[in-house]
Amino acid sequence: MARIPDYRRLVVVDNHLGHWAQANQINGEPFEIVPGFGLEQLRELRNQLRDLQDSIGVMEMQLIVARADRNAMFGATNEQGVWGRLKHYKPLLKARLGSRNPLARTVPAIGRVAPKHFNRILQAFVDHWAEVNAQVTPAFTLGPYTLAMLQAEQAALAEKMTAISQLETALLPLAREQREQLFGDEAEEVREETSIVSRLLLYRAIVRAMFATQPIADSLPDLFPAQSNGAGRLPTVRFNYHPLANGIETWHEVPAEAGDAQMAYVREGGLEEVRTLKQPTPGSVEVIEWPNVSLVDELDEFELRSMNNLTVARGTHDPS
């Protein structure tokens, strides 16, 4: 898991840019940490990171809006959208054909209503309705609502779901991977030598060597956040999650080492949410719904926090 939160990354780079500018002044001229890489090259990487983060933020908002549109088109409840219309399909068809008619007895079951099933549900009704219309005159309708209208709504919903899928499985994961590769807050064995973190680590080592006896070497800005407990690594909290039609649901078990836990925190992309725990006692299991969280790939972060909003346990995803 990354050690530098997304919202702190530009701040970290900006702090080092300011420090490097001071070091250049003390040195009497600009210096490079490797041939061709100096202060201005770090500034260029910083701007690339900013542009990537802005682009990711835009796509995350597009995804939230697209998912809301999709749910509204299908119907968030059985009183709205296409779902609200299709609930009348079976009783009206029975009234038209009689309850013993084979077509009235083979109306598709809507089943579990979840986004991944929306298109399957609509296609089943489109196929059944087309079969009904082939056998009756005039064509079967739900009041003013016709098969052609259902087909048009299905096509619009399919287009919306294609756009969502592109964001979820291609555009956003790629942009996030590019951001992580550029920034480089990863394990040393997989970190790119040209990443921002690699450059900052090298800069810090060179400054300590070049200005060993000067205050500038002691005023290096923080790179990685210090541990909040002096004893070492924070305890972990096992958690799992699954998507809902609107949002996600998480469940976790409070570890014995996190006695100060009072809140749960999640981050997905640029969205951060906090909930007060109902069962903060170590060993207790709690389920929490997060209606505003829209998943892309895996949940980015889950933590338990104290009432002072300090992290007391970091999440470890446990699908079991």
Image (spheres, rainbow, N blue to C red):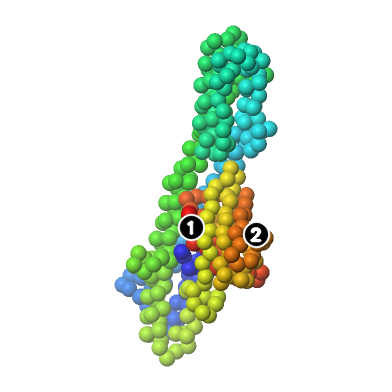
The residue furthest bottom is: 213
Q: Image point 54% across, 34% down: which residue?
A: 118
Q: Position of residue 55 (x, y in %)?
A: 50, 53
As drawn, is 93 to the left or to the right of 216? right
> Element at badge 2?
strand
Q: Image point 54% across, 49% down: which residue?
A: 242
**Residue 124: numbered disc:** none
What residue type is disc 1 on?
Answer: Asp
Position above or below: 103 against 77:
above
As drawn, is 79 to the left or to the right of 311? right
**Residue 275: numbered disc:** 2
- Residue that numbered label 1 is attached to: 318
Q: Nearer the viewer, mark 2 or mark 1?
A: 1
Quarter-of-image position of residue 262: bottom right
Dot 1, crowdedness within 10 Å: few (<14), some or many (≥20)? few
Q: Image point 49% across, 83% down: which residue?
A: 219
As drawn, is 219 to the left or to the right of 113? left
Q: Where is residue 211 in the image (x, y as percent from the top left)?
A: 41, 86
> Element at badge 1?
loop
Of residues 290 and 200, which is closer to you in this image?
Answer: 290
Of residues 256 and 121, which is closer to you in this image?
Answer: 256
Position above or below: 29 against 319:
below
Using the numbered discs, state the Cα–Cα distance from disc 2 to disc 1 in whole angstroms.
20 Å
Q: Is residue 150 visible?
A: yes
Position above or below: 207 against 261:
below
Q: Position of residue 298 (x, y in %)?
A: 48, 53
